[in-house]
């Protein structure tokens, strides 16, 4: 069975708490159908967001889609995977208590210098912090 999630991209704003749902702040949204557990998708996002710099939030969101779409073949080549990861129109936001097991919020300012991640499970915030902290939390 799939472990589904939404990945929301939001601009950091003074006075907005990272440990609450803020679908009114969402600028871009991705639906991820498989392997959305924090130790899988969360760490994959943290590794990617910690290593790469982005021009703006649109560049960041597009890069995350590209990263999630790529899979390694048996010979080590990376190829795009059809399905599994989809862009969602933010005007069609699904209630946070919908069918996804996890909700990820990626918070950044316009220039993407600092990135924070919030992770929710069953509307309970289970993580807030920068990518390095998420990597450390699930370090094997």
Image (tube, helix red, strand yellow):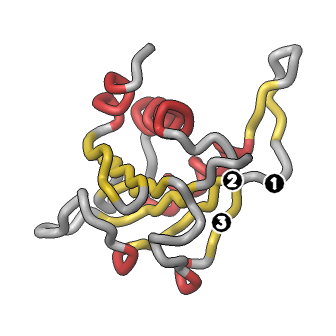
Of the two numbered discs 2 and 3 on the same chain, state the one appearing first in sequence: 2
Q: Which mark is residue 35?
A: none
Q: Which residue is mark 3?
A: 87
From the image, which quarter does the C terminus lie in? top left
Location of residue 9 by image quarter: bottom left
Q: Position of residue 42 (x, y in %)?
A: 47, 39
Residue at x 33%, y 62% (from the top left corner): 110
Q: Which residue is mark 2?
A: 33
Q: Which mark is residue 83?
A: 1
Front residue of 48/137: it is 137
Left or right of 41? Residue 49 is left
What's the distance in space between the residues labelled 1 and 2, CA to CA?
9 Å
Establish if 125 lies above or below 99.
above
Q: Position of residue 100 (x, y in %)?
A: 57, 61
> Badge 1: few (under 14), some or many (20 or more) residues near its Cα, within 10 Å?
few
Front residue of 113/1: it is 1
Of the two numbered discs 1 and 2 on the same chain, state the one appearing first in sequence: 2
Establish if 116 lies above or below 39.
below
Q: Secondary structure at mark 1?
A: loop
Q: Position of residue 121 (x, y in %)?
A: 42, 53
Q: Position of residue 125 (x, y in %)?
A: 30, 53
Q: Secondary structure at mark 2?
A: loop
**Viewer-nearest of labels 2 and 3?**
2
In the image as oriented, which residue stretches furthest toward the left? 15
What's the distance in space between the residues labelled 3 and 1, CA to CA?
11 Å
Left or right of 99? Residue 57 is left
Q: Secondary structure at mark 3?
A: strand
Residue at x 83%, y 35% (from the top left corner): 79
């Amino acid at each position: 069975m799939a472990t589904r999630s939404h990945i929301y991209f939001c601009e950091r704003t003074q006075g907005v708490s990272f440990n609450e749902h803020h679908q009114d702040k969402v600028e871009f949204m991705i639906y991820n159908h498989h392997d959305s557990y924090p130790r899988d998708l969360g760490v994959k996002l943290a590794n990617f967001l910690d290593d790469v710099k982005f021009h703006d939030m649109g560049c960041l969101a597009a890069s995350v889609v590209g990263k999630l779409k790529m899979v390694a073949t048996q010979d080590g080549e990376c190829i795009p995977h059809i399905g599994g990861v989809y862009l969602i129109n933010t005007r069609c936001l699904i209630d946070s208590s919908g069918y996804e097991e996890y909700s990820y919020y990626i918070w950044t300012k316009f220039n993407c210098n600092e990135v924070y991640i919030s992770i929710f499970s069953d509307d309970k915030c289970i993580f807030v912090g920068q990518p390095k902290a998420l990597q450390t939390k699930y370090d094997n």
